[in-house]
Image: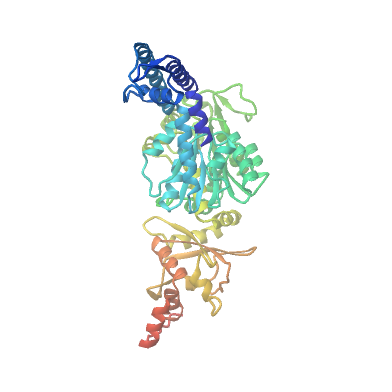
Amino acid sequence: MPNLIYIILRRLRSPLIFLILVYAISMTGFVFIPGINDQGQTYKMSFFHAFYFVSFMGTTIGFGEIPYAFTDAQRYWTLLSLYATVIAWLYAIGSILGAFQDPAFRQQLKRNAFNRKVISIREPFYLICGYGDTGSQLVRALAKEGILSVIIDNDQHRINELEISDFVVQPLWICADASHSEVLEGAGIKHPWCTGIISLASDDTVNLTVAIVAQLLNPRVRLISRAETPEAEANILSFGANEVINPFEIFASHLALALHSPSLSILFDWMTAAPGDRIKEPVFPNHGMWIICGFGKFGEALYRHLSDEGEELRIIDVDRNKRNVPVGTVIGRATEASTLKKAGIESAVGIIAGTENDADNLSILMTANEINSKMFRVARQNEDHNEHVFEAADLDLLMQRGRVVSNKIFALIRTPLLGDFLRIIARFNNNRASILVSRVIGVIDHETLELWEVRLFPDKAPAIYSMLDDQQILVKDLLRDPANRCKIVPAVPLFLKRGKGNVILPEADRILHKGDRILMCGTLEARQHMNTLTHSINALGYALTGKYIPDGCLWRWIQSKRKVKEDVESCG
């Protein structure tokens, strides 16, 4: 609010001084110009009468001459003062209207309103810095899950798009620079309901600044940041419990994984899919010579990971002055057939169009397909609005930077255990990964997969937590249908974490303990059934014993009076 007052006073300084001066001169004239009273005697107007008269005269209300009828001299002065005060007021009013139109004033007004809304938040929310392709996809996914987002972006065009967007949960937003600490404070970085900070700026320096500010102002909050260079990634990871997503490294490692262990690659794709996404068909690239078009950050990441898999690689880049390019790099435009043939396109098993221009990437793959139609074709999509064009190209694999980052971050937010699970299974061989894949396939519904986490804490699973004091509950009990205890819902317990212990595919007879966290996958219906079991004593009692346990004082009293006999099914 002080900033608003400063902006207004700055704009009104000159008109206020002019208005005060006109009033002062007008009042002085009325005080010194003599008048004539009812007895014909001369008198001088008091300062109070002068101020009173000039006040209603200047505002054109026009009550009349006071305290007595004016002389000609007083009326001449009144005419002069009248026009002077009207001009002064017009100047002042114009300046006031101009102040309200001042971009700085309007921005500060919006910022104050935004800050008040943030302060009034009483539910968990994520602070998202950057609303580009990645941010928009992530905010929409969070909204579908009922999670509130607070957004900072310095591009007014993106904020305008955000204002007309329709979300299930409407986010809060402000057009500002996220690298400024006062902006982050106003957006709720120290707010008690702030669950995490997600920095998605296209500039690694901004993401690093956000990470530093978050560590200093609120070290307890979880930070997930985007980075596009290994140096920036290492820098952000060097302090605090941060998580960094590098889209180029993620995609390159997944492509390498598809070559090394197709089953693991399938698992990673399924586990990090956005909510509602259809299960992707598995890809099976061949071993042999691969051509990488473009040796920027993306090309370098691909070269490192595919080299580790022992693949033969050939680079094409248009910049002959670029340093640190591998030996044997072909200099030229990959959109031209002669350049592709020089790189050995006829004998290549795969080609990756990884330049920063979408038109060039599509042109490269179309030209390459004319020469060698049996290749595995991979493209990098840079702009989100080109999605339909790339879909029409019918490629084997598409790298969408925004989607890669948003899907990975959303998966980490929705199921925090997923990060630990993926790190563990990354060391699996292909046979062990195939077992996991077969278990997951058994619960896929309509080509979609739900992931969720069951936490045996008082606030997350109150029914199970309270009943663990009286009886044992097994992993298989979580899979019972609350409407028919003999029926098993389509879900698989993927991972159980207890303290520092980790169990992949926990057995059905494993006993559950307070504080356990279980990563589940299955159908949406199974997730809803499990949510009922974890929150309803009545449903859980039936699932465990076959008897309905009343979960309220009134219903317990009615149950004791009625003494209803219930059959107990034997379902093992």
Q: Nearer the viewer, residue 533 or 23?
A: 23
* Horizontal arrangement in the rendering, residue 462 relative to residue 557 (left or right): right
Q: Relative to 235, is 140 on the left or the right?
A: left
Is residue 146 at least partly visible in the picture?
Answer: yes
Determine the residue located farthest toward the right in the rendered image: 238
Using residue 499 as the reference point, say whether residue 530 is left or right of it. Answer: left
Q: How is the image coloured?
A: rainbow
Q: How many numbered marks are there?
A: 0
Picture residue at 48% right of the left edge, 73% below the top: 477
Q: Whole-percent x and y of residue 300?
A: 59, 35
Point out the residue furthest to the front here: 39
Residue 543 percent coordinates (x, y):
43, 76
Tell me where residue 73 appears, x and y as whole percent: 37, 11
Question: Eyeballing the image, is 150 above or below 363?
Answer: below
Residue under the image location 42 percent in, 22 percent down: 50
Q: In the rendering, at what x and y percent does residue 169 appear? A: 40, 49
146 lies left or right of 456 = left
**Residue sitting nearer the eye, 308 or 451:** 451
Quadrant in the picture for residue 360: top left
In this view, the residue in front, 547 or 16, is 16
Q: Quadrant of residue 556?
A: bottom left
Q: Is residue 196 above or below residue 40?
A: below
Q: Is residue 51 above or below residue 374?
A: above
* Residue shown at the point (39%, 79%) measured from the top left: 555
User: Does the rendering let one see residue 400?
Assistant: no
